[in-house]
Image (cartoon, rainbow, N blue to C red):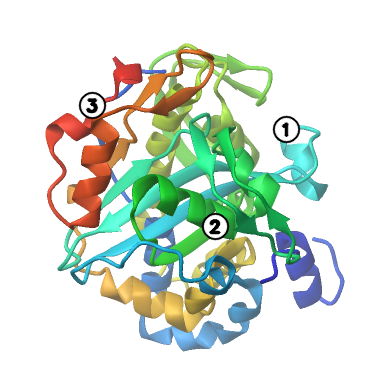
Amino acid sequence: MTHSATPESRRARRDGGRSRRPQRGRRRRGRVVLLGLLVVVLAAAGGGYWLYRDLDGNIEGVDIDKAIGDDRPEKLPTSGQNILILGSDSRAGANAALKTGDVAGARSDTALVMHIPQGRTEAVAISIPRDTLVSRPACTKADGGEVGPAERVMFNSVYAQAGPACVVKTVEKMSGVRMDHYVEIDFAGFKGLVDAIGGVTVTVDQDIKDPSSGLDLTAGTHKLDGTESLAFVRTRHGVGDGSDLGRIGLQQQFMMALLSEIKRQDLLGSPTKTFKIADELTAALTTDSELASLTALAEFGRSLNGVDPSSMETIMLPVAYDTADPNRVVAAEPQATQLWKAIRTDSDIPESAKKSPAGG
């Protein structure tokens, strides 16, 4: 399993060395965030996706099955699918200029379990707050080294400590849900993607000023470029009570706006723009080895053509504030167990499982 190549190094190889808490707990309906965005881009290429075979080299692959082994939950008893989607907070190289901090390495800044039920006509994405305390299982790192199990670790630290396969294993252990696929996008590529489509328009109902992320917006409508967009999805101190729960709402709002913008543009009528967007996205993309080609991604995207975006739903894993550390949250029971059980059995999620004690 390899995970050393950065989006910048992949672009350099290709170019011959040239550089180039708001209303917490409320359910939010919308597009299926990063993977939904990917599907739309690939669908825009249509039957001509074979023209972009040279983009295959952009995509980094992780052999999840080899890294985890056989100690995994059973697959769904239906044709449903579960995909773990991560937005990685890379804190090295070019990303340091994006105000992601001075810490080396990377963390899983955004995490979603996307469940596509049998029939693939609808979907639900479950956000896992990065401050959630979890039990990390024993894992094998990319270099073959071993990481022992640990209790009460922050969810977003697992990526930095043991890599993406361990994040998959941690999610499977905490949920009992088998992840069929893994998709990760790096923040630097996210910035390039937004700039490639000419910016994204968002509306905020209050001023947001966060020195940590660099975001400074007045209430109203704004068109954000790539750097501003990164600040928008990363801000936490300028919204709500400053917790990660508030940021989740902004991330969901932004991703809906991003996907709407891509759908609004005439990508089918502009092959050059379609290629540019796909180039930016795939250069920042890491997937499980089964999806690590444009052909496989396009085929998977076409299998989701029946999903109605208006029926997609994004909810947050039910959490409660930790009694020992109020700056952290833990999975709330019995809601979390009810939620994961519904996903495991490919059945409807009960309303009671969508209510988070930490979300009011």
Secondary structure, mark 1, is loop
Left or right: 12 as drawn, with respect to 346: right
Q: Residues at badges 1 and 2 in contact (C-beta under 8 Å)?
A: no
Q: Is residue 39 visible?
A: yes
In this view, 346 is above or below 304 = above
Secondary structure, mark 3, is loop
> Circle 3 sits on which residue?
355
Left or right: 105 as drawn, with respect to 129: right
Look at 44% across and 80% down and name the residue there. Answer: 296
In this view, 242 is above or below 296 = above
Q: Residues at badges 1 and 3 in contact (C-beta under 8 Å)?
A: no
Q: Residues within 10 Å of mark 1 (few under 14, many from 20)?
A: some
Q: Gap between marks 1 and 2, in whole Å?
A: 20 Å
Residue type at mark 1: give it.
Lys
Residue type at mark 2: give it.
Glu
Q: Nearer the viewer, residue 257 or 299?
A: 299
Give the number of the mark in front: 1 or 2.
2
Whole-percent x and y of residue 311? 17, 49
User: Residue 202's image quarter?
Assistant: top left
Among the two numbered marks 1 and 2 on one chain, the one whose residue lies closer to the N terminus: 1
Q: Gap between marks 2 and 3, in whole Å?
A: 27 Å
Among the two numbered marks 2 and 3 on one chain, the one whose residue lies closer to the N terminus: 2
Disc number placed over residue 99 in the picture, else none: 1
Q: Residues within 10 Å of mark 3 (few under 14, many from 20)?
A: many
> Circle 2 sits on which residue?
184
